[in-house]
Structures are given as structure tokens and as C-alpha cells.
Image: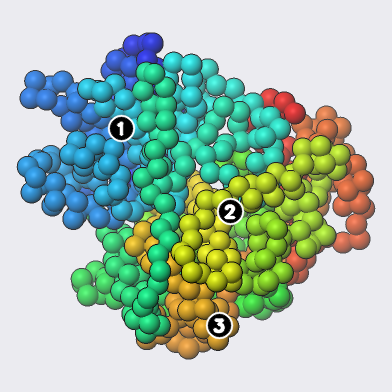
């Protein structure tokens, strides 16, 4: 659980370097406020920052170390995340003769590695980033969960590797500089993440569903999971029943903890279904009611303006209705404009992600949500992340204009808006630079490369093949961006976000369900709605998708525009050379500030420029284009 960092150097004794690795881990203190640990010996040094959710005693601390009877280290492991099959896995290992000193899942994972070697990853379920140093083999294993819920970056060196849960840990090492080249900037603006690619030069990410094996001769990637393509033969009724059972199992496994687990509840079908199932489990165990939480803005519900494709209704009335029906104890965190316009929180949002973002108030409100959640005593929360990717909930997944385009469907949607025609957040970036670096071509080539990975079933029609491709792209290229953002924002305040819809068994099953079964009679996510129909009131059950809320107030638009005007007037600003003079002048001279349903898109370019300036300055970015 929490955060991991480390250093392996096959040409040095790192025993004296414990302080360096502790400094790397200290950059991740926000992820693990409940404890810290370090192990340094020979060619390896591993550090851990703990978020205590399982085995709250010292026996749950990490790094977990297995030694011989004589006290010599055999293997050392650090884990960030939660093994949802921890109990079953531990029982299986105990039956094979393994003995445990505590009840933590880090120790369980270590024993699984000792039993099965690198193949232990196929036996782990849940959300995790793992580092294992095998003293006997002088080998490091780095791995991430199947969908990439938990982040893990690494930086190869001539004689080894540095790694950390977030890039800031690696940047804290004295030998690493924050260099960003043309490819890094392309990745920053593409809005279609390439698996394994980082923004900072030399830095990469462990690919979801993969392990990186680091040895003295060199490193190699090893895939341990991929989305399987199978023929679906179940009837619709059987499919609905199976989805219900798989989702119930996933929720039950994600609520396991020795600390309270709450739920995010927006009043949409995804979060409401999770909350209803979790409340039933907690009540049956005598530990209910479930605590549910939502975020809202002052005046938002009363003055709501619908967005034609993304936000049909305000959350608050539906969240309240769902909570009453479910029986949860609900809390709404209400944010005013002052809470959204604190420049310090905008900077915190940037530092949480180690990169600028065009989402502005959405990032700030999410950060404040998790801060309040932690104040309420919750360090773990259920979230509906990835339900739309699994069940084809996004409108672009079935709108032919976007689903059949020659690029990622979500990119096609963005390019349909003048303010995001070059990509969301790029509108203030110099047009010649965008053309030279070819942001659009970068995304389109990535799209073509991604298509070559998609597994298919013989006999699928052209429409079925394309539907499978869109789902694959959503799960492997769109979901990682949002999972990373959700993890960074939640862990910025020491809260672990748990997404049951990322459960392996559920994802594999629904991935192979024909698109027509997921959207019967054109009803968005009808398969999921049918699977939980008995749990929710009709108004919530049939509510159209409404994305995470963003403020529509002119006052927030005024704040963004004023800050951008000040930045544009500063010729010495770090970002000045990257700004497009014409677009900047037009934005500053515009009659009024962005407001209403499309305001977030219109603000995105200014928001990104502001964050980009702070990033270049605070991270001392060496931009080499």
C-alpha cells in the first residue's frame, strides 16, 4: 500500500545510500502518511511510504523482507495498492507451508513470489505496483496491475535503474534532471497516452499488465496479461446474471480493509450500483451503513445548463435520491468559487500529477474532495472509474461520426470543437510549434499502432470487429489517463481510490460481450442497468450519463482569464516562447469570460498555459525541442 521507490546499481554498493532512497520516498510522503521504511544492502536500496489500510500494526510495515534462518536476506518487496484476493492467496500459500508474521498483503505478495517466481503476478488480483529485489538472483522485478490503476515510473541508468510510484521520486535523485524533449511535449498534449511512455526524457512507465525484469546484462519487459478475445455464447439473461455476480464479487473484494471504506456517489448508474452493493455487504456484516460522498458547487444545481453529450443533469438530486433508496449515510462537499480559485490548490494539482493539465476546476474540486474525505476519517473509497470503458458508456463509443473515425474516438470528438481543434488544451500554444511537432499526427500514428494489438474472434462481422476495437482502445489508451489522474488526486491526500469495475474477471467477461448486448434497443449501458435493476430507484437507474461536474460560473471564468492576461503580459514568463501571439491576444481581448456548459472546453487552453508556466518554473524543466 502507499508509495514505493528504489535504486539498483550493479556497479555500486548501495548500503551507504539509504538516505538517498529515503529522500526519493520523501517526495511521495503524501501517498503514505502512516509510516516509512527503507532497506539497503549490496546493489539495491528500496523504500516505502505507508498508507495503513490492512494490518494496521507494525507487522504490516514495508519493505517486506524474507530471510534465511541465519538472517541473510532472500528477497525484499514493496507494494503500493491492495491485493483484493489477499485472503484466498494467503490461505493457499499457508497450505503449501508458508508461514507469516503479520496480516499485510505485502508479506503475502512476497511469499507468492517465493513460491512461483515471476509467474506470481498471474495469481494476484486487485490494484498494485510492485518492486521485488531477489537477492539470490541479483534481479529486480517491477510490475503493475492489469489496467494500470497504480502508477510506476522507472529511469534506466548505465548500470541499473531508478524507480518510483511517481516521477517526482525519480527527479529527487541527484543524478536526474527534468529534461523534456519534443517527444515528451507531444506526449503531454496528445491526450492518448502511449503505454510505457513518460514525459521526462529517459523516464518510462511500467506498462500495465507487464513486468520489467532488470539484471546485470540488461532489462527486458515481460507481459503477464492481455485482454483475451473469446466467443460469447451466453444468452442475454445469462449475461445479465453473470455481470451481476461478477460485479457483486468485485465490490465485496474491494471493500476488504482494516480501516473504513467509503464510496463516491454521484447519482449515476456506476457509483450508485457500487454503493448499493457495498451497503448490502456492510449491513450484512453488521458494519453498516455505508458512508457515501459527493462534490457539488454552490448554485450549480439551481443554475445548471446541460451539455448535449457530456452532462445531462446535475448530480446532487440524484445522489440524494440514490442514498435515500440505498440507505447509505451521505455527505455532500459543497465548494464555492473561492475554493476553486485558490492558486495554491491549482499548483498542488499540478504537482500531484507532475505535469500540467487543462482541466482546471475539475482537478481542484477533486483534490478538495479527497482532502475532505481524509478529514472525515476515510483513507479508502470505492469509485466507478472505468465503468464507461467496460460497458461502452461514452457517447463516442457508438456515435459513428467518432467511433468510425481515423483516430481515437475521443480525439475525434475534441477536434470537433474550435477551442480544442488542435487537441484539448493546445489552443494557446504556438501554431508553428504545433505544426512542427505534429501533435495531431503523433496521436493518429499512436492510434494506428494501437489497432495492431487488438485481439479478434474469427467470424466477427465488420461491425463487431470495430466495436471490439473501440472497447480495446478505451480500456488501454483512454482509461489509463483517467486512472492515473484519479490515483494522483486521491493519493495526494493519502486516500486510496478503489475501482471495482477494473476487476479482471469482470473486465474479461464484459469485453467479450457483443456491443448489441451492452446497449439493447439503443439504451446506454443497458447491460449494467439490467444487472442492478433491483437495487436502485427508476430515476437513478434510467438517468443518462453525466460526466464529472465542472463549474459553469462566470466568476471562475473571470479568474482564469485574469490570471492568463497577467501571464500573457509577462514577457519573462517561462512559457512565453511557447504561446501563440494571435490566440493569446484574442483570448485577452475577448468580450466576457467562458461560462455555461461549454466553458470548460473554452477555458482549457488558458488553464493549460497557466499550468505549463508553473511546471516549467517549479520543476526547472530543461525544454529541448
Residue 493 image position (x, y, % from top left)? 46, 48
Location of residue 21 with respect to 328 vertically, above or below: above
Q: Residue at x 33, y 21 (%)?
A: 44
Of all residues, the one furthest to the bottom in this rendering is 538
Nearer the observer, 547 or 564: 547
Q: Which mark is residue 185?
A: none
Specify which label sits upstream in the sequence, 3 or 1: 1
Mark 2 Cα shell of 10 Å, populated few (<14), some (14-19), many (≥20):
some
Q: Secondary structure at mark 2?
A: helix
Badge nearest the viewer, 2 or 3: 2
Q: Secondary structure at mark 1?
A: strand
Q: Residue at x 35, y 70 (%)?
A: 247
- For the image shown, how many numbered marks are present on the structure? 3
Mark 1 Cα shell of 10 Å, populated few (<14), some (14-19), many (≥20):
many
Nearer the observer, 527 or 223: 223
Residue at the disc numbered 3: 523
Residue at the disc numbered 2: 451
Mark 3 vs mark 1, CA separation in Å: 46 Å
Specify which label sits upstream in the sequence, 1 or 2: 1
Nearer the observer, 492 or 332: 492
* Residue 432 seen by the camera: yes
Q: Are marks 1 and 2 in contact (CB under 8 Å)?
A: no
Mark 3 Cα shell of 10 Å, populated few (<14), some (14-19), many (≥20):
some
Mark 1 vs mark 2, CA separation in Å: 33 Å
Residue 131 image position (x, y, % from top left)? 34, 34
Location of residue 250 with respect to 361 vertically, above or below: below
Quadrant location of the N terminus in the rendered image: top left
Residue at the disc numbered 1: 132
Q: Secondary structure at mark 3?
A: loop
Amino acid at each position: 500500500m502507499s508509495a514505493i521507490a528504489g535504486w539498483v546499481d550493479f556497479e555500486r554498493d548501495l548500503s551507504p545510500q539509504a538516505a538517498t532512497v529515503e529522500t526519493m520516498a520523501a517526495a511521495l510522503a503524501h501517498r503514505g502518511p502512516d509510516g516509512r521504511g527503507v532497506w539497503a544492502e549490496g546493489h539495491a536500496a528500496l523504500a516505502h511510504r505507508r498508507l495503513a489500510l490492512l494490518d494496521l500494526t507494525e507487522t504490516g510495515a514495508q519493505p517486506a523482507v524474507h530471510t534465511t534462518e541465519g538472517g541473510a536476506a532472500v528477497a525484499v518487496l514493496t507494494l503500493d495498492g491492495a491485493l483484493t484476493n489477499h485472503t484466498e492467496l494467503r490461505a493457499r500459500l499457508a497450505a503449501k507451508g508458508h508461514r507469516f508474521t503479520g496480516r499485510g498483503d505485502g508479506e503475502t505478495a512476497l511469499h507468492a513470489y517465493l513460491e512461483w517466481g515471476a509467474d506470481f503476478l498471474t495469481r494476484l488480483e486487485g490494484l498494485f505496483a510492485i518492486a521485488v529485489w531477489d537477492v539470490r538472483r541479483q534481479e529486480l522485478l517491477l510490475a503493475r496491475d492489469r489496467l494500470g490503476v497504480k502508477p510506476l515510473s522507472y529511469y534506466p541508468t548505465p548500470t541499473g535503474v531508478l524507480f518510483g510510484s511517481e516521477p517526482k521520486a525519480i527527479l529527487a535523485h541527484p543524478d536526474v534532471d527534468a529534461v523534456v524533449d519534443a517527444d515528451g511535449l507531444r506526449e503531454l498534449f496528445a491526450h492518448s497516452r502511449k503505454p510505457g511512455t513518460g514525459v521526462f526524457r529517459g523516464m518510462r512507465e511500467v506498462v500495465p499488465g507487464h513486468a520489467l525484469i532488470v539484471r546485470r546484462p540488461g532489462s527486458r519487459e515481460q507481459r503477464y496479461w492481455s485482454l483475451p478475445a473469446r466467443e460469447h455464447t451466453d444468452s442475454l439473461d445469462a449475461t445479465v446474471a453473470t455481470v451481476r455476480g461478477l460485479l457483486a464479487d468485485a465490490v465485496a473484494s474491494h471493500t476488504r480493509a482494516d480501516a473504513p471504506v467509503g464510496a463516491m456517489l454521484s447519482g449515476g448508474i456506476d457509483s450508485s450500483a457500487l454503493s448499493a452493493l457495498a451497503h448490502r455487504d456492510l449491513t450484512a456484516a453488521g458494519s453498516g451503513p455505508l458512508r457515501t460522498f459527493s462534490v457539488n458547487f454552490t448554485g450549480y444545481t439551481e443554475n445548471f445548463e446541460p451539455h448535449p453529450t457530456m452532462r445531462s443533469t446535475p448530480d446532487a438530486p440524484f445522489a440524494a435520491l440514490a442514498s435515500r433508496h440505498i440507505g447509505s449515510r451521505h455527505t455532500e462537499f459543497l465548494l464555492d468559487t473561492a475554493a476553486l480559485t485558490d492558486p495554491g490548490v491549482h499548483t498542488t494539482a499540478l504537482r500531484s500529477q507532475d505535469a500540467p493539465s487543462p482541466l482546471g476546476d475539475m482537478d481542484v474540486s477533486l483534490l478538495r474532495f479527497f482532502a475532505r474525505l481524509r478529514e472525515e476519517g476515510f483513507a479508502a473509497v470505492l469509485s466507478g472509474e472505468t465503468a464507461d470503458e467496460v460497458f461502452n458508456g461514452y457517447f463516442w463509443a457508438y456515435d459513428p461520426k467518432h467511433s468510425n473515425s481515423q483516430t481515437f474516438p475521443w480525439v475525434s470528438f475534441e477536434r470537433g470543437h474550435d477551442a480544442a481543434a488542435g487537441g484539448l488544451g493546445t489552443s494557446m500554444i504556438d501554431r508553428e510549434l504545433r505544426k512542427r511537432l505534429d501533435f495531431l499526427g503523433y496521436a493518429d500514428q499512436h492510434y494506428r499502432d494501437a489497432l495492431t494489438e487488438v485481439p479478434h474472434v474469427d467470424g466477427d462481422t465488420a461491425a463487431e470487429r470495430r466495436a471490439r476495437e473501440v472497447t480495446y482502445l478505451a480500456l488501454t489508451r483512454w482509461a489509463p489517463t483517467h486512472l492515473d489522474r484519479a490515483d494522483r488526486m486521491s493519493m495526494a491526500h493519502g486516500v486510496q481510490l478503489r475501482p471495482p469495475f477494473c476487476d479482471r474477471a469482470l473486465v474479461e467477461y464484459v469485453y467479450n460481450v457483443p456491443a448489441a448486448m451492452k446497449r439493447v434497443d439503443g439504451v446506454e449501458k443497458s447491460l449494467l442497468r439490467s444487472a442492478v435493476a433491483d437495487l436502485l430507484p427508476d430515476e437513478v437507474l434510467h438517468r443518462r450519463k453525466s460526466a464529472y461536474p465542472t463549474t459553469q460560473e462566470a466568476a471562475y471564468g473571470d479568474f482564469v482569464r485574469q490570471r492568463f492576461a497577467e501571464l500573457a503580459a509577462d514577457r519573462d514568463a517561462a512559457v512565453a516562447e511557447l504561446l501563440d501571439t494571435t490566440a493569446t491576444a484574442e483570448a485577452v481581448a475577448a468580450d466576457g469570460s467562458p461560462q455555461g456548459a461549454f466553458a470548460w472546453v473554452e477555458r482549457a487552453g488558458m488553464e493549460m498555459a497557466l499550468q505549463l508556466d508553473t511546471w516549467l518554473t517549479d520543476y526547472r524543466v530543461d525544454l529541448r525541442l
